[in-house]
Amino acid sequence: AATLQGLARNPNVDPERLRDVLDLVKDQLGKLRANENSWGQELRDDEFLSAVRQRSTITAGTCNFDLPALHYWLQASADQRVNDLQGWLRSFDQLESSVTLCLKLVRESAIATQEVAPSGFFQKTLETSTPCQMIRVCVADDERCFPEI
């Protein structure tokens, strides 16, 4: 938030949009701080997940005679298992929301450029005045190659 507040002096920055972003960041920070000691606590307290976690470290500890609840759950319908998984992941919704906001701000803070790698090689010296926070590489689906950074 402090870095963003410094942008208020930049004449190229829309003050209303900056204020909206700052409000959003402050809101996310408040929500994160409110839960900072409890991330995943619901999962740690869940009897079923605790049993699976404890037994999974033992060789063959997840056999049906050691963890009948796990095997019963695995036999449940796919819809039921997906519903359970979504419920377990819900405890991380706020964390996901905050990370998504951070990534959005980083992605939108720079102007994308289109580059070409002649003969399959591309090299670029980054500006030292602007710290590089993220590199996004897009390769067409029909290209038979992959980026190596």
Image (cartoon, rainbow, N blue to C red):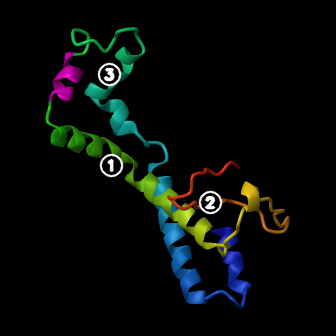
Looking at the image, which residue is at 40% across and 10% down? Answer: 58
Give whichever of discs 3 and 1 has the lower sequence position. 3
Residue that label 1 marks? 90
Residue that label 2 marks? 137
Residue that label 3 marks? 52
Magenta stretch, residue numbers: 68-75
Residue 104, placed above or below residue 86: below
Give whichever of discs 2 and 3 has the lower sequence position. 3
Q: Quadrant location of the N terminus? A: bottom right
The amino acid type of the residue labelled 3 equals Val
The amino acid type of the residue labelled 1 equals Arg
Name the side, left or right, on which 89 lies relative to 69. right
Spot occupied by residue 10 in the image (x, y as percentages of width and height): 73, 86
Give whichever of discs 1 and 2 has the lower sequence position. 1
Crowdedness near tag 1: few (<14), some (14–19) or many (≥20) residues, C-alpha within 10 Å: some
Looking at the image, which residue is at 41% across and 55% down? Answer: 94
Residue 87, placed above or below residue 4: above
Looking at the image, which residue is at 33% across and 31% down? Answer: 45
The amino acid type of the residue labelled 2 equals Val
Residue 78, placed above or below residue 21: above
Crowdedness near tag 3: few (<14), some (14–19) or many (≥20) residues, C-alpha within 10 Å: some
- Quadrant in the rendering for residue 138: bottom right
Cα–Cα span, label 3 and label 1: 19 Å
